Amino acid sequence: MDNAPRWAIDNLELDRVGPTTLADQIARHIEVAISEGALHPAGRLPSWRDLAAQLGVARGTVKAAYEKLIDRQLLVTAGSAGTRVANPLPPSVAPITTSDAELLQPPDAFYRSGDPLVFQMGVPAHDAFPGTLWARLNRQAVQATALRTGHSDSRGTIELRSALASHVAIARGIECSPDQVIVTGGFRAGLAIALQTIDAKGKEAWVEDPSYPATRLALDLSGVRTVAVPVDDQGLVVSRGRKLAPRAAFAVVTPGQQAPSAVTLSPQRRTALLRWATESDAWIIEDDYLAELHLSGRPANALASGAGADRVIHLGTFSKTISPMVGIGFLVAPMPLARQLIDIATWLGAPPNAAVQLALAEFLREGHYLRHLRRTRRLYSERRRCLLETLATLGIDTAIPAALSVVLPLPDGFDDLALMNKAWAEGIKPAPLSPWFADAKRTRSGLLLGVANVLERRAEHDCRQLLEMIGDLSKIAGQSSPPFVPA
Ligand SMILES: Cc1ncc(COP(=O)(O)O)c(C=O)c1O
């Protein structure tokens, strides 16, 4: 064992009761160590005997793990020299040069994988996910679909579309048939279908200012000419939109709880927005990302409910209410556009795996989803209160609750992106506020602190760590920074 690498063994924890065999777990661990560079090409592995003794498993188990990796050309046997990491490695795991590696990463660190960290936005509570139940529903759904070999419906399974149609009728006031529902891979996938359907390239669109940066990026990539329309304490200022871009082809809005301000579009503005769409033959893309995940009061009905709904393409997602890992959202097609939306979804898209759809349908039908929402609403309210109180105890009384986050305003010009980088390097994950603004004249500096993973026992420690990074607290304590959404 003397020269054997210490890499993996120190943190190799075997699950001796779970369904994965010990050999598979050891093989997986070695594979990860190779792909992360902890084990180098040509590096020697411990002998079966040594590793087996170290891990407290049979020699045959380690032998089986090594043989799996030899079959996959990740390891080679070198006679009396033992077992070594292949050199060169097969391209599937070979690390690439740093510049290429960066080139091939997702564009935004937000979309790289990993467990949720404190203050992270857009992820549910790590400790409240009904994992056992979800795993059981998925197992059953995989079994039910394993022997089906045909195509599944390009709009999504009928089980899920029916469950969604019933759910949005009760929870969001939308009256629609399951045939108007298209299951998607989440908000972004639904947005892509909507943009192709309305032939958005080259056209003008209203976007809220401030708004979700990913939406503006998606529109830019699609060749849309975005026009930033300000948001105030009643939501989108429709009259400004009419002045800035009267002939816009569509608007993308978050009327339920505006992202990031959490303002609900007022009844007058709803009417004004729907009237504009009807008069101008324009479309409204409704991003209902939080749906009924409303921490106080009753959520307003969706724009796609009631009069004017035939101009609204309603996009729902389970990213916030269940988890982005589920990778499912849906679109409710207004009748005038339903045929084209279904055609685009069929020929240029594809629904998520049928088994996950069935598991989600069951989750909805059996009432688990509503129970989960009730529990998480309570939990997030408590966590948000805890975060605000902790900040207040530490002298910060300028923090503003906003849906599932707390906004911590910083003085104008404060580099919130640099602050984010510093915080992320230390394992806490606030989001900078400035990228949410399109118009430089309106940009505000600040941090968005997601509340979902704030734990009471750690809150003071995490807040102190964050505030220390900000540095001179006098800069934010009691400052009179203008509100980021003006009244
Ligand atoms: C405003 C807004 N819309 C939509 C989403 C969800 O997007 P998706 O379903 O693509 O994960 C998010 C997630 O962060 C969001 O903040």
Image (cartoon, helix red, strand yellow):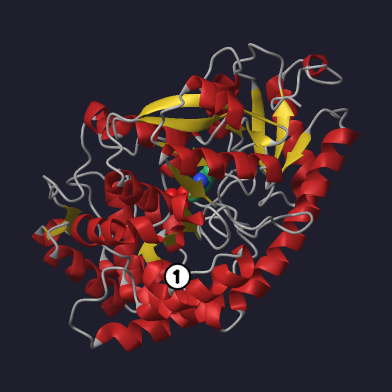
Q: Position of residue 159 (x, y in %)?
A: 41, 81
Q: Nearer the viewer, residue 97 or 246?
A: 246
Q: What residue appears at the point 31 percent right and 68 percent down from the top-left corner?
A: 155
Q: Quadrant of residue 196?
A: top left
Question: Residue at (39%, 83%) from the top-left corner?
Answer: 141
Q: Determine crowd level at label 1: few under 14, some 14-19, many 20+ residues with C-alpha closer than 10 A.
A: some
Q: Residue at 76% across / 40% down in the picture?
A: 401
Q: Is residue 219 above or below residue 322?
A: above
Q: Nearer the viewer, residue 147 or 11?
A: 147
* Rendered-image quadrant of the C terminus: top right
The relative height of residue 1 versus residue 103 in the rendered view (above or below) is below
Q: Looking at the rendering, which quadrant does residue 443 occupy?
A: top right
Q: Position of residue 67 (x, y in %)?
A: 18, 70
Depth check, front residue: 254 or 403: 254
Please indicate whether residue 234 sits to the left or right of residue 156 in the image: right
Q: Is residue 21 visible?
A: no
Rendered position, 206 above or below 30? above
Percent x, y of residue 136: 48, 82
- Element under label 1? loop
Inspect this view and state whether residue 67 appears.
yes
In which image quadrant can residue 407 be found?
top right
Q: Which residue is mark 1?
A: 14
Looking at the figure, which quarter contains the N terminus? bottom left
How many labels, in total?
A: 1
Q: Is residue 69 left or right of residue 428?
A: left
Does residue 183 appear left or right of residue 377 in this picture? left
Instruction: Specify the amino acid type for callout 1.
Output: Leu
Residue at point 44% right, 63% down? Answer: 326
Residue 439 in the image: state x and y as whole percent. Answer: 53, 18
Residue 148 is left or right of residue 366, and the answer is left
